[in-house]
Image: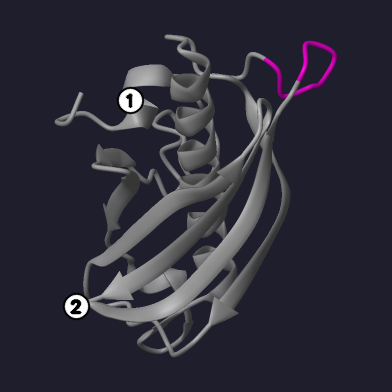
Amino acid sequence: MAESSLQDRYAPHNACFGCGPANDKGLRIKSRVEGEELVADWTPEPHHAGFPGSLNGGIVGALFDCHSNWTAAYHLMRKAGSEELPSTVTADFAVKLLRPTPTDRQLRLRAHVVESSQRRAVVEASLEVDGEVCATCRGTFVAVKPDHPAFGRW
C-alpha cells in the first residue's frame, strides 16, 4: 500500500473535487501513509492562484479538508480493526494561513490524529513548501451512519 494512495486504493471512482481520482478537473490529491501520519505531495497549477505566485486560500482549505478527512477515515478504520473504510465527513475545520503559499513548487501536506473516539477524529495538519510551514489546520471528522447522504460514498 505504501506505493499507492489511499484514494486510489479505497475510492477509485470517487469524484470529489479535492481528492477524487475520477474527477479530471479536481485537485486529485494522493494521500499515503508514512508512519503515524498521512502525507500528500501536490503541485499547483497557475489557475490555482489567488494572486500571482500565491495559492488561493480556498484551494488551501480544500486540500486540508480532503487530506484531513482521509487521515480520520484511515485512523478510524485501523482503530476498529476493519478492512472497510468508514464514510467520514467534515464536522468542522479551521485553517491558519501563516504566509503566502507559492504556486511554483510542490507542496507537502502532513496530517495526524490528535484525539479520537469510535466515530470521531480530530486531525491536525500542515502545508509545507521546501520544509517551511505556510498553513495549518485543525478539524473534526465524523463517521456517518447509513441514513446520511455521504454513507457508502467510497
Expressed as whole percent of the image width and height from the top left, the position of residue 21 reads 39, 31
Residue where numbered disc 2 is placed: 130
Residue at 32% x, 77% y is 103
Instruction: Indicate the secondary structure of the residue bearing disc 2.
Output: loop
Residue type beneath disc 1: Asp
Based on the displayed image, in which of its 4 quarters is residue 17 positioned?
top right
> Which badge, 1 or 2, is on the more N-terminal residue?
1
Q: Nearer the viewer, residue 100 or 93?
A: 93
- The amino acid type of the residue labelled 2 equals Asp
Dominant secondary-structure state across the stretch colored magenta: loop
Q: Residue at x 30, y 50 (%)?
A: 39
Q: Mark 1 sits on what residue? A: 8
For the residues labelled 1 and 2, the Cα–Cα distance comes to 26 Å
Rendered residue at 48%/57% (across/down): 63
Left or right of 99 on screen, residue 116: right
45 lies left or right of 72: left
Q: Residues within 10 Å of mark 1 (few under 14, many from 20)?
A: some
Q: Position of residue 29 (x, y in %)?
A: 37, 46
* Above or below, 52 relative to 85: below
As displayed, is residue 89 above or below residue 84?
below
User: In the rendered view, would you say 65 is above or below 3?
Assistant: below
Name the image quarter holding residue 34. top left
Left or right of 42 on screen, residue 67? right
Q: Quadrant of the N terminus?
A: top left
Q: Is residue 86 magenta?
A: no
Res 12 seen here: no
Query: Could you tell me which secondary element the residue under label 1 belongs to?
Result: helix
Residue for point 26% across, 76% down? 129
User: On screen, 40 above or below 50?
Assistant: above
Range of the magenta residues? 145-151
